[in-house]
Amino acid sequence: MVQQMTSRLLAVVMAVAVSSGLLAHATQGPRPAMTSAAPVSFKLPKVKLPTASDLQMTAHRVSNQTLILIDPRSEPIRTAFLRDREALEKLRHDPKSKVKGNLNEYISMQQVKLQVLEDDALDQLSRSALSVADARISEMHHVVAHARATVNQSGGPDQPQSGDHSG
């Protein structure tokens, strides 16, 4: 208790000393301008700030790497999910996209499909059903391939491809 009171008193004394010094400095009056010095200009580099999807992908990578350390058997599933999710994000930002309609909504729907497949694969892995988990990885790759084909075709996501029954 004595130490706490001493610390508070010391903090008050320091605050008064700093305030006094600032007040004394401010009352000295204006200083003459330096005429011989050249004006200083700073050029800040142009920095591209990360987008929300960049930050989200980084968070997914960190969490997946942590989960892989906890359960090494899940590495193929989590790696496939990240790779496919990043591929969908690249499609979202592809300037050559021929999509008619809402590309962001379409890509988000495909990412939800990937998430469902990843969750199912991890669930099957926990039940030791490795063949089903491998099948879900293949389905995840199929979702990305289908999205890539849809984005690159002239019809866009509003018109399903012929022969596509995956919804």
Image (cartoon, rainbow, N blue to C red):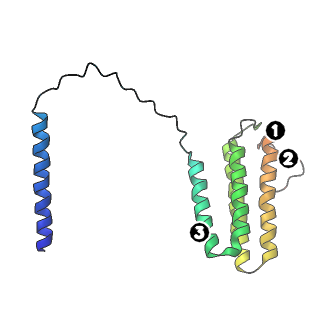
Q: Position of residue 93 (x, y in %)?
A: 68, 41
Give the mark toward the camera: 1 or 3: 3
Measure how far apart labels 2 and 3 are at the Cα level.
Answer: 38 Å
- Furthest-right residue in view? 163
Task: From the image, tell me which residue sits under label 1.
Answer: 155
Image quadrant occupied by the N terminus = bottom left
* Nearer to me, 2 or 128: 2
Q: Position of residue 152 (x, y in %)?
A: 81, 41
Give the mark toward the camera: 2 or 3: 3
Q: Amino acid at mark 1?
A: Gly
Q: Which secondary structure, mark 2?
A: loop
* Nearer to me, 38 or 6: 38
Q: Quadrant of residue 3?
A: bottom left
Q: Amino acid at mark 2?
A: Gln
* Pointer 2 or 3: first along the chain: 3
Task: From the image, tell me which residue sits under label 3.
Answer: 66
Q: Position of residue 146 (x, y in %)?
A: 81, 51
> Looking at the image, do the residues carrying marks 2 and 3 touch, with CB atoms under 8 Å apart?
no
* Pointer 1 or 3: first along the chain: 3
Label 3: few (<14), some (14–19) or many (≥20) C-alpha neighbours in 10 Å? few
Q: Residue at x 90, y 51 (%)?
A: 163
Task: From the image, tell me which residue sits under label 2.
Answer: 161
Label 1: few (<14), some (14–19) or many (≥20) C-alpha neighbours in 10 Å? some
Q: Amino acid at mark 3?
A: Thr
Q: Is residue 121 left or right of residue 32?
A: right
> Looking at the image, do the residues carrying marks 2 and 1 touch, with CB atoms under 8 Å apart?
yes
> Looking at the image, do the residues carrying marks 1 and 3 touch, with CB atoms under 8 Å apart?
no
Q: Position of residue 100 (x, y in %)?
A: 75, 37
